[in-house]
Amino acid sequence: MEAQAHRDQEEARINQTLALKIDLKQQQHFPKKLEQVETKENDSSPPLHEVETILHYKFKNKHLLEKAFTHSTYCGENSLSYERLEYVGDAVLNLLISKEQFFLYPNLQPGHLTRLRAVNVDAEKLARAAVKHGLHRYLRHKKPLLGEQIQEFTKAIAEYPLHSNGLIDAPKNLADIVESTIGAVFIYCNFSIDIVWKVFGKLLEPIIDPDTVQKHPVTELHEMCQKKNLNLQFIDLWKESMSVNVLINKKFVGRGIYGSKKEIAHNRAAKDALENFERVLGISTSTNKDALELED
């Protein structure tokens, strides 16, 4: 009982100290033109009130919700798009995850907490939440290729049930609408981070924890080569062949190919090198240390 009381006191202090002090009256300054945006909605777009069912949260004033799902290409004005709500939602989400981790893992060091938080708030993790709950269907935009990108992403994540660690390209717009919706709820509920967490905690599941978090393949490869005193080189051939090669002690160990983004090719090259490490170099790898270790 004393421990719970102490946690409650700590949470209250954190909420009071870190919650953004924004006057709720500022809501009246949101552009009235959102009413005009609503009339532009394509017939094929599902009605936004369905988002409230997904969230289990009701907006009496729908303007914030409309804005949270309006891309700048749709409304023609950045002031009417979700960008400012996304900015708020990003900050709130980082605070929420930090708060949860602080109490859940009292023995985890700051460096590990930072890595654990990062993987729970990055573009891929949020894009997965958007697809899982169908939030992407309500995004109002005029980006011709976005639908195809979402389809590719949806197929790609099937191979990685929790997180790919940089091996697939997540459409940023999917992550954006999760953050903008968080921002909209945060402002609408008078800046209560407890209410926001109640709404979004389950939507963001599964939360990656110290037992399920995996090292980024580039980080893991660098650490392995440093530990074994091996010379690691990434050969950038992306402009010529959309690929990146990995040499270790001048031996070809792996290759990554991805045409849309060099960073993904780089990450896939590291992953391929890790998988070929023992076979090509004849050097055994150490026991899997991907999960974070709690320190006493």
Image: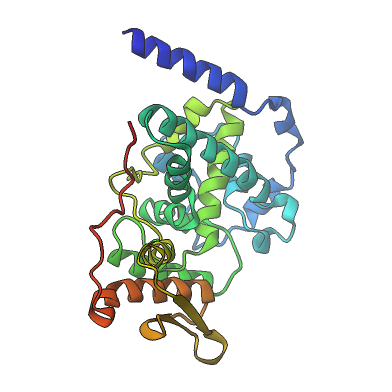
Of residues 115 and 258, the one drawn nearer to the viewer in this rendering: 115
Residue 292's place in the image compared with 141, above or below, is: above
Q: Position of residue 65 (x, y in %)?
A: 57, 43
Q: Is any part of residue 256 visible from this angle?
A: no
Residue depicted at 40% across the width and 43% down the height? 54
Q: Identify the residue at horizontal 43%, vertical 34% (top origin).
A: 199
Task: Examine the rendering and report whether any part of residue 78 can be seen.
Answer: yes
Please name the colour scheme applied to the rendered image.
rainbow
Query: In the picture, which quadrant includes the N terminus?
Result: top left
Left or right: residue 291 compared with residue 269:
left
Q: Residue 176: horizontal and vertical position, in percent?
A: 56, 53
| Count of numbered badges drawn on the protein | 0
Tell me if 61 is positioned left or right of 229 in this view. Answer: right
Asked if 45 appears above or below 146 in the picture, the reply is above
Estimate the x, y position of residue 284 in percent, counting from the top left.
23, 69
In this picture, is 41 found above or below 94?
below
> Going by the image, does 162 lie left or right of 265?
left
Q: Quadrant of the C terminus?
A: top left
Q: Residue 244: percent from the left, percent from the top?
A: 47, 82
Q: Does 162 sit left or right of 144 as displayed? A: left
Q: Quadrant of residue 188?
A: top right
